Amino acid sequence: MPARPARLPTEREIAAYEADGAVALKGVYRDEWIALLREGVAEAMRTSDRYSRRIQDEGEPEFFTDYIASDRVPALRRFALEGPAAELSAALMRSRRANFLFDGVFVKEPGAAKPSVYHQDQPYYCVEGRQIVVLWAPLDPVPAHVCLRCVRGSHTWGAAFRPVRFRDGGGFGRAADDGYPDPPDVERDHADKLLAWDLEPGDVIAFHGMTIHGAPGNPRTGVRRRATNTTWVGDDAVYVERPGAMEPDFPDCGLKEGDPLDCARFPRVFERRA
Ligand SMILES: O=C(O)CCC(=O)C(=O)O
């Protein structure tokens, strides 16, 4: 079994996650796991793979993103398979099991201006179901004005918006005709619903796969904004294929439409004892 979180979410926190589509959980990852994640992020930035990207404009401080870096970075793999995230996610999803979908790395160096554009995660991915949770973990102190922010209740809107590329706003071949309308202008139309928090390493924002979220640039001097996420699916999650490209995609996962996401590619890391 993987390591236990420093604490489990309270019933009140789980209810907030369900109602708002996002909740901040204070003090759930112990220091040793934060140290491992920092080591993993450094290695991810030293090495590169097909999903490693530098998003910043020419001459600007770096904004680095990566997906599935745990395939090549042992520290990130160890965190996912042996760390505290799996049990935390199962509690939030009220799921019997938690399967690891993949992980992400998001580093904004001091002064990195580019925002992480508002989007929902699930429409990028090969997943349908209600039990999909993303655990976003800062590895540096993050005040609310720099923090990831989530649109309260947007996971219940019943709309899957067009996935958007951070770098240039481009898409993945999915459009309104395919059932993926353009994402809303959040700052203009939904600013009153934005949730953001003052966070420290060890805290986590848990948000639902259909929650609209984004993050501003990092205007600070001398303070990096490193973060990782891990995405987890539960009992009801199934594999789907979407029009256009999926990001990331898993061509060798061996699943067909409707199959449970429960296989070697998406390992069952946590299972509740009967
Ligand atoms: O950390 C960020 O800037 C963006 C994170 C994000 O979009 C995600 O975790 O899905």
Image: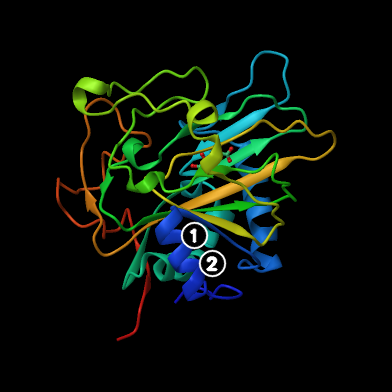
Label 2: few (<14), some (14–19) or many (≥20) C-alpha neighbours in 10 Å: many
Q: Position of residue 165 (x, y in %)?
A: 45, 24
Callout 1: few (<14), some (14-19), or many (20+) C-alpha neighbours within 10 Å? many
Q: Which residue is mark 2?
A: 83
Residue 53 at least partly seen: yes
Confirm whether residue 46 shows in the render: no
| Location of residue 98 in the rendering, given as x and y in whole percent from the top left corner | 36, 65
Q: Secondary structure at mark 1?
A: helix
Q: Quadrant of the N terminus?
A: bottom left
**Residue 174 picture location, percent across and down:** 27, 24
Q: Quadrant of the C terminus?
A: bottom left
Identify the residue shown where x is 22% and y is 29%: 179
Specify the quadrant of the image occupied by residue 159: top left
Q: Amino acid at mark 2?
A: Gly
User: Is residue 249 positioned above or below 207 on the image?
Assistant: above
Q: Is residue 48 left or right of residue 17?
A: right
Q: Which mark is residue 80?
A: 1
On the picture, is 244 further left or further right than 83?
A: left
